[in-house]
Amino acid sequence: MMKPKKLLERRKQRLRASIRQRAKGRVRLSVFRSGRHIYAQVIDDGAGCTLAAASTAEKALRDNLKSGATCDAATEVGKLIAERAKAAGIEKVVFDRGGRLYHGRVKALAEAAREGGLSF
């Protein structure tokens, strides 16, 4: 039986291969979820650089939120990443959930980013 961390890595690799095939020049919105925080980055894989980033670990969000591990916190990060991506001139992205289920905090972040104007 495989360990959960190994299974997560396999799902992540499988998902990234799928994203590479359907990206067609678009940048990637990558989400990382830890026990205490949630992080989002808009990454240009062709150039190998991060174009925009947001997380609950930032001082501005940390002061306003009770905890960084809630759906409300993920919604705030989603709005913030959409705002920063639009400021960088990005409207279309490919969503990379990082091997996690599209549920809970990951879903809340994605829906908030869509409401903020990102298309995926």
Image (spheres, rainbow, N blue to C red):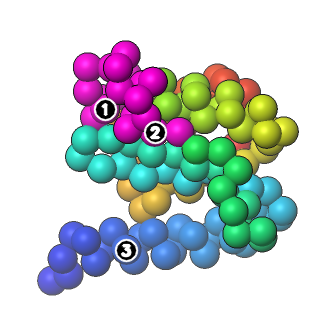
Residue farthest to the bottom, as pictured: 1
Q: Position of residue 88 (x, y in %)?
A: 79, 39
Residue beneath the point at 35% across and 20% down: 63
| Mark 2 surroundings: few (<14), some (14-19) or many (≥20) residues within 10 A | many
Q: Amino acid at mark 3?
A: Glu
Callout 3 environment at 10 Å: few (<14), some (14 to 19), or many (20+)?
some
- SS for callout 2: strand
> Which quarter of the rendering shows the C terminus?
top right
Foreground disc of the pair 3, 2: 2
Q: Is residue 83 above or below residue 22?
A: above
Residue under pointer 2 = 55
**CA distance for labels 3 and 1:** 24 Å
Residue at the extreme front of the image, as rendered: 59
Does the magenta segment cover residue 73? yes
Question: Which residue shows up at 58% across the image and 26% down it?
Answer: 79
Disc 3, SS: helix
N-terminal label among 3 and 2: 3
